[in-house]
Amino acid sequence: MMNHKRVVPGIYRRALIGSLVIAVWLGQAAIGEAQIVYNDPARINQSFVFIYWGLEGDTTDASISQWAFPVSGMIPLADNTELRYYTAFSGADASSSVFDRNISGFTDTRLHIARTLAEDRILITGGINLPTGQTKLNKKQFALLLDLSAEKSNFPVKTYGEALGFYGEVLGATEAGRWIIGGGGGVYYRGSYEPADDDISYRHGLRLYLTGSAEIAAGESTSDRVKFDGVLVIATADKANGNDVFKNGAQLDLSATGTRRLGRWVGSARARLIVRGKDQRLSQDGDLTAESHASTGSEFRFSASASHKLSGHWDGALDFSSKFLGGNGYPKDDLLYDGGATLIGVGGWVSARFSERTRAAFGLRKWFGNAAAGGLTESLSLSGWEITQSITVIF
């Protein structure tokens, strides 16, 4: 959140620049935004997330769940420089009448430094992915990881370990009347590692990012704002034992977010569209060839919440989340067929400030939906629960 203790244009500019940092680097979710908030003290946040899904179909009766204990925080290094960190301990399992899979352990650790220059109009960021997690997974663990990382899933931890990686980005922002406009570019490099227990060395290609953002005040309150973001991701080919084996298609991620204060209530809504291009896969002659269809369809998300000041130290909110993943265009008799999914979540949360340095929150959400599973399987009905808890300590 923005620091409202000093509401001046420079603070808005800093928050906008920070929000452009690619959150794929900073967190496992799913994709959110990171923000630079200056003049705030160091903090550590411990969270707990549990998500359970039951899947039912004509021939399917299965369940998949994940729990995670993420630890993240921020350390100010100077007036215009900060360090952020993230790691987690997590476990997951999936079971049915024909299989039982599980995985647990630490994830990789990510460190991120950001510094502003030119009176806060330029932001330079850099980060490192430390390979503290798990690789060389067995067949059951690798199959479970594919389910956790699928686009139709909303699990918080989508990978348990990768290679040593480096990330860098340069961003800029300026004011244009009532608007704050920014943009920039970044690159993410990952080294080689063995993801599965098969002695094959794998290296993801470079990920190149182009970002843009625009924000405008929409009212008298500092909460009344509208913001637009765009991220274009372009990748080079992935390699296995030094040979090109796969290339991600380009991805365009567009979002619009609005917040509004009405007395003791604050409402917010966000719409997000993700368009994915065709991947390139190995053909029979050994060359990379573009797919006939994008293997993952476009995705639309919409969420809204209304929070209220319950008392001096307590806040509460009701929220709604939805996720619509379109089909990929392949025919149903093709093994690459994916008919998409629809996920709907309703719930709420309460938060409390126990002291000037300690805050806590608890959330509960009910999920339901359906998915047309990939391959030669039937449509599935989905039903699930999500429990979240967090404690923040300020130093």
Image (cartoon, rainbow, N blue to C red):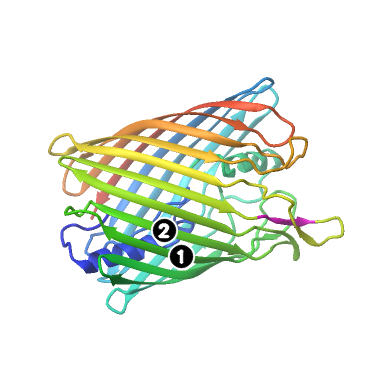
Q: Position of residue 268 (x, y in %)?
A: 30, 44
The image quadrant of residue 215 is bottom left
Asked whether residue 157 is in view, the answer is no
Q: Residue at horizontal 61%, vertical 45%? A: 297
- The outermost residue toward the left is 312
The image quadrant of residue 283 is bottom right
Label 2 sits on a secondary structure element that is strand
Majority secondary structure of magenta residues:
strand
- The outermost residue toward the right is 285
Q: Of the numbered discs in the image, which one, if any, rests on residue 316?
A: none
Asked whether residue 185 is in view, the answer is yes
Label 1 sits on a secondary structure element that is strand
Q: Position of residue 269 (x, y in %)?
A: 34, 44
Q: Residues within 10 Å of mark 1 (few under 14, many from 20)?
A: many
Counting residues from the N terminus, which is met first, the one under dot 1 or under dot 2?
1
Residue that numbered label 2 is attached to: 229
In this rendering, would 110 be left or right of 194? left
The image quadrant of residue 308 is top left
Q: Are marks 1 and 2 in contact (CB under 8 Å)?
A: yes
Q: Of the numbered discs in the image, which one, if any, rests on residue 211?
A: 1
Amino acid under disc 1: Thr
Q: Residues within 10 Å of mark 2 (few under 14, many from 20)?
A: many
- Up-down: is 204 above or below 270? below
Amino acid under disc 2: Asp
In this rendering, would 293 be left or right of 175? right
- The outermost residue toward the top is 58
Q: Residue at horizontal 28%, vertical 48%? A: 259
Q: Which residues are magenta?
A: 278-282
